[in-house]
Amino acid sequence: MIREAKKQYRKLYLSNYNTRYREKHVQITFRISEKKYKEFEKLAKKDNKKVTFYVKQLILKNQNNNSPFDLKILRVLLLQTIDITEEAIEENERVNTSTLLSLLENMHKLIT
């Protein structure tokens, strides 16, 4: 009797939860080529994530990072990296790798 009551409670709880969830969240569906899906699948596997979760994260990150301000910052960081490298080549000196690495890490943060 207790097992049956637990099953019934769980059934009612999930039904209520799913109804409330659908009221607050919108589902978006789209199609991609199988080739593109395989690419996403490989990338998701590297991050130990499900493909759909990986694509969702990718889209949301792209939406948040797609402001012109981020592109300006990225452009400045890229120009600084080029300047440091060109200066080291012209002066026939070694590149300050810690500075260069720091700039590259900042650029990576902007695009991921």
Image: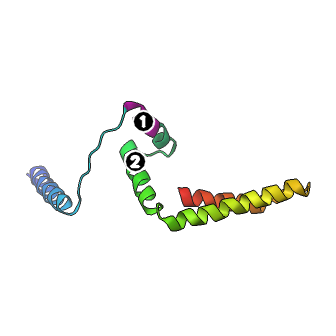
Q: In the figure, 21 relative to 55: above or below?
A: below
At horizontal 39% and vertical 44% (from top left) the residue drawn is 50
Is tag 2's residue or tag 1's residue first in the polypeptide sequence?
Answer: 1
Q: Nearer the viewer, residue 86 or 31?
A: 86
| Mark 2, secondary structure of its residue | helix
Residue on which the image places disc 1:
36
Magenta residues span 34-41
Q: Nearer the viewer, residue 93 or 99?
A: 93
* Outermost residue, left side: 1
What whole-number distance in Å separates the C-alpha atoms at marks 2 and 1?
A: 11 Å
Q: In the figure, 16 relative to 50: above or below?
A: below
Q: Is residue 109 left or right of residue 48?
A: right
**Given the image, on which type of amino acid does mark 2 rest?**
Val
Within-10-Å neighbours for mark 1: few <14, some 14–19, many 20+: few
| Mark 1, secondary structure of its residue | helix
Q: Can you tell which of label 2 and label 1 is closer to the viewer?
A: 1
Residue on which the image places disc 2:
55
**Percent coordinates x, y for residue 56 in the rendering:** 37, 51
* Outermost residue, right side: 92
At horizontal 48% and vertical 61% (from top left) the residue drawn is 65
- Examine the residues drawn in magenta and state their main secondary structure: helix
**Can you see residue 94?**
no
At horizontal 49% and vertical 41% (from top left) the residue drawn is 43
Q: Nearer the viewer, residue 66 or 102?
A: 66
